[in-house]
Image: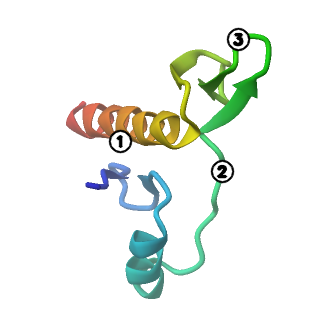
Amino acid sequence: MDCAIRISPDGRKVTTVYNDKFHQAMRPLLGAPDITRASHVQYDAEREIWVATRVSDGSFLCEHKNREECVKEEVRILNQDLNKLSKE
């Protein structure tokens, strides 16, 4: 899975979707990360489906019957968002 990374214009902040492989490779360069959750994946028992939402505003990201597939789509969307931000 590809990983998007955004570096702030002043070069002081790096933002990415957390990935253990990326973390292991970049930690020696960037130091200890300040990790904050961008989204949640929770089970909706009433509808029997996994739902991903943004932490910032509770907005819907995606849903799927299978949790693993929901997480994959969640990561894809968050990486896509980072790519858009990097081009602004």
Mark positioned earlier in the residue sequence (3 or 2): 2
Q: Residues within 10 Å of mark 2 (few under 14, many from 20)?
A: few
What residue is at 65 percent from the left and 27 percent from the top?
56
Mark positioned earlier in the residue sequence (2 or 1): 2
Q: Could you give the CA–CA distance between mark 3 and mark 2, rounded to whole angstroms?
A: 28 Å
- Residue positioned most to the top: 47
Indicate the amino acid at tag 3: Arg
Which residue is labeled 3 in the image? 47
- Report whether 49 appears left or right of 11: right
Q: Quarter of the image holding residue 32?
A: bottom right
Instruction: In the rendered structure, find residue 79 and report the number of the disc placed on it.
Output: 1
Which residue is labeled 2 in the image? 36
- What is the x, y in percent for residue 34? 63, 63
- What is the x, y in percent for residue 47? 70, 11
Q: In this view, does 26 lie above or below 65?
A: below
- Report whether 66 appears left or right of 56: left
> What colouring style does the render use?
rainbow
Q: Could you give the CA–CA distance between mark 1 and mark 3, rounded to whole angstroms?
A: 27 Å
What residue is at 51 percent from the left and 43 percent from the top?
68
Q: Quarter of the image holding residue 78?
A: top left
> Is disc 3 in contact with disc 2, using a CB cutoff of under 8 Å?
no
Q: Residues within 10 Å of mark 3 (few under 14, many from 20)?
A: few
- Report whether 22 appears left or right of 65: left
Indicate the amino acid at tag 2: Thr
Q: Is residue 77 above or below residue 60?
A: below
Which dot, 1 or 3, sits closer to the camera? Answer: 3
Q: Quadrant location of the N terminus?
A: bottom left
Please, what secondary structure does the residue beneath circle 1 have?
A: helix
